[in-house]
Amino acid sequence: MKVVITGGSGFIGRALLRRLSGEQHDGPGAFLPANDRLDISVLGSSAASVEALARDYPMFTIGGPWPQGGDALDGLLRDADVLLHMAWSSMPSTAATDPARDVRENVEAGLALLDRAAAAGVRAVVFLSSGGTVYGEAQFLPITEAHPLAPVMQYGVTKLAFEQQLQLHAALHGYRHVILRPGNVYGNTSVGDRPQGVVEHWLQRAMAGEVLEVWNELTLVRDYVFIDDMVDVLQAVLLEPRLSGAYNVGTGIGTSLQGLIELIEGITGSSIRIATRPVPIRAVTANVLDSTRLAGELGVVPGTALEHGLRTLLERSRTKG
């Protein structure tokens, strides 16, 4: 089975490639012998990312950059069973400050990639969207795929725009499409100074005895998805040819920011101090995702309890450090 992947340099992409390369991990998802069943190519989005991917994953075919790429890119895409498109250049804060760039680098460049994929005979495209932003303010909880799509931030608007482009493009060109809408995925041990990942940043600060920066009301509720669970879903989706349409990827359990702080205090033994900062972008009050459809059609859904995921992340962070 031929699979082409974009976004391999990102947080979720790195975790997926580690899994597919056969690297050991502590998660529950070593149940699919993907190495033996998948012919994997990874596309970098720049010359630098192509070079880094080739260095880190010599077991895969590395190509790009996309969407330009030339004949070599068309060769990698030719007759692929699945194009897994995870590459996305923005995060909520950067999308809000430069919407035009967000559209140009993600929607327009992504559509150019879809054109090349369709011309090369790709049979299915799987897109990693955002269940945390495309629905906007929840009219009911947990949110199902039937919930109205009304994003309140630029990041969600752009993700939804590409979802719609993909749906139309797939219908016009006759390939299968799958849209995955995950909740707040966490578990990154390499956050650095990127303004993304409240779980990782707060855990990092708590471990260092530093003040936690709070940008939103502590009553905000989110659905936190552990990275190992997200990789389980992606790996299973690659091997399931029957899926089509949009699917939530969430636990169905909401945790407030206050509850998150209390969990971090419990596992680190820290007494956390917080400092409130001005809200940089509008945030929805609550986001909890219903993954019933995914469970019924794929049989794999996120199941790691937040406390367990936090403890695992803490252990991995300490080991890495």
Image: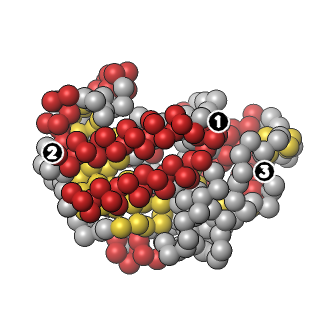
Q: Is residue 66 visible?
A: yes
Left or right? Give the position of 249 relative to 80: right
Label 3 sits on residue: 216
Query: Which residue is at 27% across, 59% downward?
Result: 170
- Quadrant where the image shows the C terminus: top right
Q: Is residue 157 left or right of residue 162?
A: right
Q: Answer yes or no: do the residues labelled 3 and 2 have beta carbons within 8 Å?
A: no
SS label for mark 2 = loop
Q: Residue 275, located in which quarter of the rendered image?
A: top right
**Place of residue 199 in the rendered image (x, y in percent of width and height, measured from the top left):** 66, 48
- Residue sitting at x 56%, y 53%: 156
Q: Is residue 227 visible?
A: no
- Residue 120 is tagged as 2
Report the amino acid beneath label 3.
Asn
Q: Position of residue 78 (x, y in %)?
A: 14, 43
Q: State the CA–CA distance, disc 2 to disc 1.
A: 35 Å
> Residue under circle 1?
97
| Amino acid type assigned to the residue bearing label 1 in the image | Thr
- Left or right: 136 as drawn, with respect to 230: right
Q: Of the residues under marks 1 and 3, which one precedes in the sequence?
A: 1
Disc 1 from disc 3: Cα separation: 18 Å
Classify 10 Å Cα crowding around label 2: few (below 14), some (14-19), many (20 and above). some
